[in-house]
Image (cartoon, grey):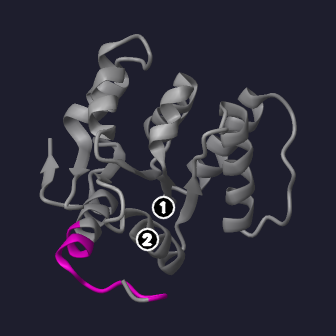
Amino acid sequence: MKPNKLVQIKNVVRADACIQFLMNRPKTEMVGLGLIYGKPGLGKTTYASRIAFMRGYIYMRLESTTTPKSFAVDLMTALYRRFGLGEFIPSGITNNIFKYCLKLLDDNPETVIVIDEIDYAFKHDKLLGAIRDIVDVTLTIVILVGMQDVHILLKKATLSDQVEPVLSDLLSHSMFLLRATWLISIVCR
């Protein structure tokens, strides 16, 4: 991919189609959750960060040290910047920060959040629950970006007590799974 540009290769076209579908979905009947996954070095992060920048989406990157609290704080900071609410340093208990995030997202239903390195969320089950809450409680679209086996981890998480059963419904009914070479196919269930 060229700097500051997205070449319209098949993978980019398919990923764009996924996001467009989620934007045009029947919002009261279907959550806005998507997943892009594949092998390292195939352009997933490049696509995710550039499309977020070009379209004004919120881009977040999880790290090995991300906790539920740091996720809530990062999300709140990103929402304040995105909606022009000034500089804000969130403080308080995790639940209060996250509930305020949900309120901001509920007030701005056209918001799209891209969460890269979703694989790190499996270290803290509450991170997956928080992401589920975002798409479950608001009309926000969340695009998850992860490594080639992340879809397997998500399915395993739905079969264990790690994530509430609602995520299983999200996976089976309303998630696009985009996979590698980066995107071999799009599966809509």
Q: Is residue 43 left or right of residue 107?
A: left
**In percent of the image, x 51 and y 56: which residue is there?**
113
**In percent of the image, x 30 and y 86: which residue is there?**
7
Q: Percent position (x, y) of residue 151?
A: 28, 38
Q: Which residue is mark 1?
A: 110
Q: Are marks 1 and 2 in contact (CB under 8 Å)?
A: no
Asked where in the image residue 8 lies, by quadrant, the reply is bottom left
Q: Percent position (x, y) of residue 138?
A: 49, 43
Q: Percent position (x, y) of residue 19?
A: 32, 63
Asked where in the image residue 51 lies, by quadrant, the reply is bottom left
Q: Is residue 33 magenta?
A: no
Q: Amino acid at mark 1?
A: Glu
Q: Residue furthest top?
A: 161
Q: Quadrant of the N terminus?
A: bottom left
Q: Earlier in the sequence, mark 1 or mark 2?
A: 2
**In percent of the image, x 44 and y 51: which residue is there?**
142
Q: Which mark is residue 164?
A: none
Q: Nearer the viewer, mark 1 or mark 2?
A: 2
Q: Quadrant of the C terminus?
A: top left
Frontmost residue, 105 versus 121: 121
As helix, strand or loop, the secondary structure at mark 2 comes to: helix
Q: Percent position (x, y) of residue 157?
A: 36, 22
How packed mark 2 is, by other alpha carbons closer than 10 Å (few <14, some 14-19, many 20 or more), is some
Q: What distance separates the C-alpha of mark 1 from that of mark 2?
A: 23 Å
Q: Which mark is residue 46?
A: 2
Could one spot residue 129 in this view of the protein? no
Q: Residue furthest front?
A: 41
As helix, strand or loop, the secondary structure at mark 1 comes to: loop
Q: Is residue 13 left or right of residue 82?
A: left
Residues shaded magenta: 3-14
